[in-house]
Amino acid sequence: MKTKNPYVFEKLDDLISFELNAILHSSTISEADLQTLVSRFDKELKRLNIDFRKRFFDIKDERKGAALVAKHSDAVVLMINRVDGLMQTAAVKGDAVVRALNDITRGLHELHGFIKLNYGRFMSSELLIPITELRELRDMIVTKRQHLRDLLLDNHNPETACDIVMEVLDEFCSRVAAGLVMRVQDADYYKMIVSNIEDYGSQDTALSDCPSLHELLLFWNLNSKTCIRYFCVGIELHMGAMLTVDARLEYLRDQLKKVGMLPQNPGFIYDESHPSIKTFFTDYLANEIIYLENKRVGFLPNEEYKEEREKLPLIKVLCTLSGDQISLFLRAANDLKVIVARSMAAVYNAIVPYLSTERQVDLSAGNMRVKSYQAEDRDKEILITKLKEMIEVIRSY
């Protein structure tokens, strides 16, 4: 009976995992046995070039074809890594062993190249990358390390921020030295960091008053604990010098606006097990703003407190827009001075309590104001469409 998901490289894998391993761990290594195994390995490689093509073209479903390519690409990488591990101790076993392992490694790289050349469009950055390619990238980073750090420092970046980048590159080199399995996208991430640093002079910054490396840390989505701590401590120290709650609120709102403006390279993230650095700081700043706004209201004189916190609307108006869409409308109206109040918070506090949506009766003025800085494209498009419809209605009056 035919297997549902055939492993085309099974015989090749057995030659490496069992027969080669057995020869290398025998008490006496026979050069003739090594040559025989390498010869069988070469014949199997030639057969696979034909057999793999046939298996692939027998598959009518493109998704299954892509799965076959991914499965066998990763299998070749793991075989390369396995032989590479044997290579690390081969020198003490004699020149014949080294030559045999070099021949096998070369053949496996040719097989991997054959897959990439012929089926590259079915391969993604989620696939594994050979340890040999990772080692080349590591050696390049080690060679350039001091130059990369000098480039960052020469562009007037804080030394602590530069050290964060170096720490990340050093950690990658340590992972390679430990022989850890990685994906293509992992290697691409560190290539991007090196490339961006080397092209530093040609970069335009989005914010003139912000160290350019700060923008790069967000662009790289470098959400390491050290990096997040660096930004949090910086914000806390900056706010610590401010004497009033209002000054701190103004600073946090400005930071929230800036974080929203900064670009982030899609598809790249340092630690996939944690939120992106942009998401973390958007939430962090939003929560700090809400906390300080509540604190500020708590310190208002009694009459103002009552006005801000205790006034209850007699009637609520149902709005068919969502809370996020309403928040965008109010922010735009405030920015254009269509609605004028002593502050943006006052606009939301005065209007939001009188509104409800189809999903929510009681809306939070503070949350909605913060949400206006985290606009999603879908909400923008819906609001724009409604405003255009209103324009047409007004024209018909």
Image (cartoon, rainbow, N blue to C red):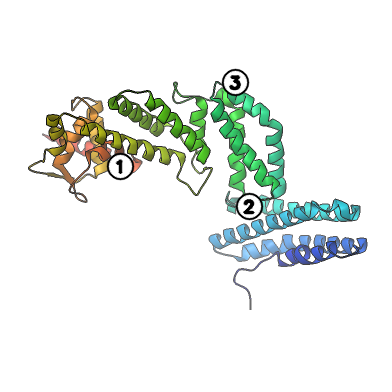
Q: Is residue 309 above or below residue 360?
A: above
Identify which amino acid the numbered label 2 is placed on.
Leu
User: Would you say the residues marked 3 and 2 are in contact, meaning their CB atoms lie under 8 Å apart?
Assistant: no
* Left or right of 112, for residue 5: left
Identify which amino acid the numbered label 1 is placed on.
Asp
Identify which amino acid the numbered label 3 is placed on.
Asp
What residue is rendered at 17% in x and 48% in y? 361
What residue does disc 3 label? Answer: 154
Where residue 26 sits, quadrant-wise, is: bottom right
Q: Position of residue 179 (x, y in %)?
A: 69, 50
What residue does disc 2 label? Answer: 128
Q: Earlier in the sequence, mark 1 or mark 2?
A: 2
Residue 168 appearing in the image = yes
Q: Where is residue 86 in the image (x, y as percent from the top left)?
A: 79, 55
Q: Position of residue 289 (x, y in %)?
A: 31, 34
What residue is rendered at 63% in x and 75% in y? 2
What residue does disc 1 label? Answer: 379
Q: Tell which of 349 and 68 is nearer to you.
A: 349
